[in-house]
Amino acid sequence: MDLYDVTIIGGGPAGLYSAFYSGLRNMKTKIIEVQPVLGGKVNLYPEKVLWDVGGLPPMHAQQFVQNLIDQANTFSPTICLNTKVEQIKKQDERFVLSTESGEVHYSKTIIVAVGGGILNPIKLEIDGAEKYEMTNLHYTILGLERFRNKRVLVSGGGNGAIDWAVELLAVAKELVVIYRKDQLTAHESQVEKLKEYGIPIMLNAEIQSLVSNRNKNAIEQVIISQSGEITSLEVDDVLISHGYNRDVSLTFADEIQPIRKDDYYLVSKGQCKTSVPGIFAAGDIISYDDKVHLLLGTFQDAVLAVNNAKLYIDPQADKCAMVSSHNDKFIEKNKELLKR
């Protein structure tokens, strides 16, 4: 049995910063992430420019994620990717985490950092649509250059769809947005940007069928039904943003069932402690009054969760880590940086 001081479930921003801070606090740390990569939901918008993280210049989300990963690896935590935790129970004074593959992990404390859950994009419900996913049917944007000088159809009217459409203004040759309802639900400022550029927005419209090219491997035309009328659009790429299905399959044994809000979010008793001693949470999964739903708030959650995990293991420990300018752990690392 390999027993860890803290096991962090989720490798998004909350989990990654928790890993860094727990290493700073001399805790034996493990991250378990269901996806094949770290970074969480931020990976859905790799080209999005982030402006509102303290002390950082504007940067693409993919660079921000890489910075978080590099920082999380500062103290060499154990990282398990492609690993889905299904149940947590407690045996004696340790938590036992059972995974979908049958593996078992052991930990003195748990930090739940699963965000909004495991997100799976809602697929286009048209027969045969899945065969185009390898060519020009997309459920996320992994790089804007893929769409340079292309005719792009964006289906969706929420923040995700409209944010993508605004990003594509700089590269796409033609852009059309369709939405099944009579009014877009995205932020007004983003919608106004599309209107300023004269981007066609088709409301009360949805994709009825897809027409393939000669090779039968890519979409050439999209047939759209709008208020009963049929329109055909020639396209190079189709981007679907119809939301996500949330997998909330992580469960707890009856005797350590934490109090939840809306049957999902873990309720904080203060300082990111759940109702179960030894189980803490950070990021979107934790609920409390005056919560800041921004990346900035995520980092504070992580610090609070780690500090309380440390105190749970060792009640005599300092309440928080020493600041970096006075922390012995950074003396050698600062020397290395100066040499560079």
Image (cartoon, rainbow, N blue to C red):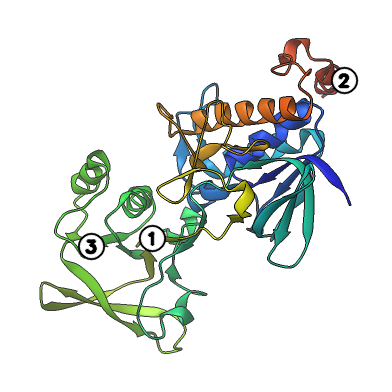
Q: Residue at x 70, y 29 (%)?
A: 21
Q: How far apart in space, not on screen, are marks 3 and 2 (Cα)?
A: 56 Å
Residue flagged by tag 3: what amino acid is it?
Tyr
Q: Which residue is mark 3?
A: 179
Q: Which residue is mark 1?
A: 149
Q: Nearer the viewer, residue 265 or 134?
A: 265
- Rendered image: mark on residue 332: 2
Residue flagged by tag 2: what amino acid is it?
Glu
Image coords of residue 31 (percent x, y): 72, 46
Q: Earlier in the sequence, mark 3 or mark 1?
A: 1
Q: How far apart in space, not on screen, are marks 1 and 2 (Cα)?
A: 50 Å
Name the secondary structure under disc 2: helix
Q: Is residue 238 left or right of residue 63?
A: left
Name the secondary structure under disc 1: loop
Q: Is residue 316 left or right of residue 240?
A: right
Q: How many marks?
A: 3
Q: Is residue 148 above or below residue 95?
A: below
Q: Nearer the viewer, residue 263 or 25?
A: 263
